[in-house]
Each structure stands twice: as C-alpha cells, then as structure tokens.
Amino acid sequence: MDDRHRQNRAAALLSVASNAVQAVVKLAIGLLTGSVAVLSDAANSAGDLVASGIAFAGVRAAARPADEDHPYGHEKSENLAAAAEGALVLAAGAAVAVEAVRRLLEGGTAIARLDLAIAVMAGSALVNVVVAARLRRVARRTGSPAIEADAAHIGSDVFTSAGAAFGLALVAVTGWTPLDAIVALAIAGYVVFVGGRLAWRAVQVLMDRALPDDELATIAGVLDDFAGEDGVSFHALRGRRAGSKRHVDLHMVVPPETTVREGHALSGRVKSAVRRALPDTDVLIHLEDHSPRATPVSEEAGDRRRTTGP
C-alpha cells in the first residue's frame, strides 16, 4: 500500500470514529430531551456513519492492484462508494423531513434540558469543522473522490448541527416549540441537496465523463511544447477519471522517417511530461505516420470547450 492509500485509509477511519461517537451521543440526548432537531441530527450522523464505512471500504478496494479480472485497476471503487454515500444522505434527509413534518402537524413537542441539547449541537458542529478540514487536506493531496465526498458530507453537517443549535436557542428564547420541527425540516432540505450533489458527481465519473477543461488544457499545453520542438502533432485527445487516477489517450503523428525506436522514445518523454503536469495520470499514446489532416490538440481542446460549455 503506497502513502496515498495510507492517508486515505487513515482519513476514512477518522470519519468513521467521529460519526460513531456523534451518532450515539446525539441519539441519547435526543431521547432525553425529546428534541426532533437533535434526533434528526442523530439520524443524519447515523447515516454519516454508514456512509463513512462505505467510503472506507471503497478506499481499501481502490488500493488493490490490477488483476486478471480488473486489468485497469480498482480505482472506481471510490466512485461507487461516493455514489452510495450520496444515496444514503438522500435517504437520511427524507426520513428527517417526514419526522419533522409529523411533529410540525402535531404542533410541536415540549423539550427538556434545552441547554444540554444546545451544547451537544454546538459541540458537534465544532468537531465536524475539525474533521472536515482534515479530510479536505487529505483529499487535495491524494485526489480521492471518496474522501472528498466524505469531507463535503461532514462539512454540510457543520451547518446542520449549528442550525439545530440556533433553532433550539430560539425555542429557549421564544418558548415556541414548533420552531424545533421547522429547523429540522430546513436541515432535511439541506441534507437532501448535499446527498443529491454527491451522488450526481459520482455517477458522472462512473459514466466516464471527460476531464475538466482546465486539466485538458494543461495536457494540451504540454503537447504543444513537444509539437514545437520535435516536429510532431497530436490529435484525438481524450481523458477520464477513475477514482483518484486519470486515464488519458491520444494520437501522436510523427514524420515518416521516424523509426519505431525513436517514436517510442518520444512517446515516453511525452508521457513523463504529462505525468509531471498532472500526477497520477495513466497515458496511452497511439503513434501515426505523418498526415496533413491531423489537427493540433490545442485546437481540438478549444473546439470541445466551445461545444460543451463550462
């Protein structure tokens, strides 16, 4: 296991531990106080626990090397984990919304020990700030979509817990208990939004969506340098992501007098340059004899940006 996978695994374990403790504490306080906002956040943390467990499983699976049945590796396990996490977040948000509406229709329920409920929600928000920041740092270093999704998920919990604390404080000030259910309903709406966004992004990668325009432009810039220095041209540039790894393929057009040895040596230099510009990139280059029909790759990248938009 390389250092990147070790960092992802440690971050996923931190998320599991944090969500487990928070789910237990919030459930106990929610039952003690009768606050639907606290209970809704406990349900959210329980969903977070399952989701972080899935993220951990995805990170472990992605670390496995390529084998006969999976010659391209197991990196998409992380995207599957991120999609499952998004679906679980959606389900948790829907469950919270149903309970909040039921409590609201009943006119609200008396809440005991508001001070304790507020303290737990505020403490949960602070814990999530620290954990989310740690996961974001790891995701930036490793490019892990599973850890990135977990960081975004836990980051959203900062707002749900802080919102619950604020709502309970308003209940304490006004004495109007339906505010508890109203805050829980707002939390549910935000949780559903976050879950939908996580699932959508993961599905796009599973469908082999093209790399972002800025990454394709970076690759095109590297290739244009070789075109100017070595008298070659490039076209048919494509790229996709699987987990934290990028897969890029392109055609390189060489002069007709170029030998096979020279062509492969040049393609090796191109691959190394692309990997320096974008680490964790697998590059496949198809060599072609010189053809006047070849289009510079920078023009193809520009055409793509004009036709597909931002």
Image (cartoon, grey):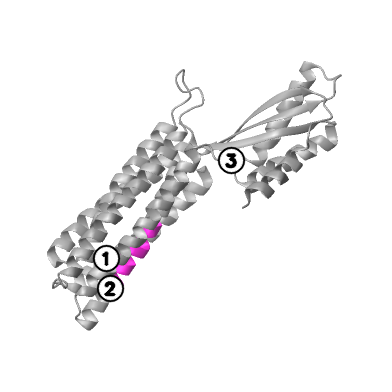
Q: Is residue 107 above or below residue 78?
A: below
The dominant secondary structure in magenta is: helix
Give the residue at mark 3: 210
Q: Is residue 168 above or below residue 210?
A: below
Q: Position of residue 196 (x, y in %)?
A: 40, 52
**Mark 2 and mark 1 in contact (Cβ < 8 Å)?**
yes
Considering the numbered disc 3 on the image, is that residue within a helix, a strand or a loop?
A: loop
Q: Earlier in the sequence, mark 2 or mark 3?
A: 2
Does residue 253 show up?
A: yes
C-alpha gap between disc 2 and disc 3: 43 Å
- Residue at 17% over, 72% down: 108
Determine the image quadrant of residue 119. bottom left
Amino acid identity at mark 1:
Ala
Q: Answer with left or right where residue 68 lies relative to residue 162.
A: right
Amino acid identity at mark 3:
Ala
Give the residue at mark 1: 184
- Residue at 39% over, 37% down: 58
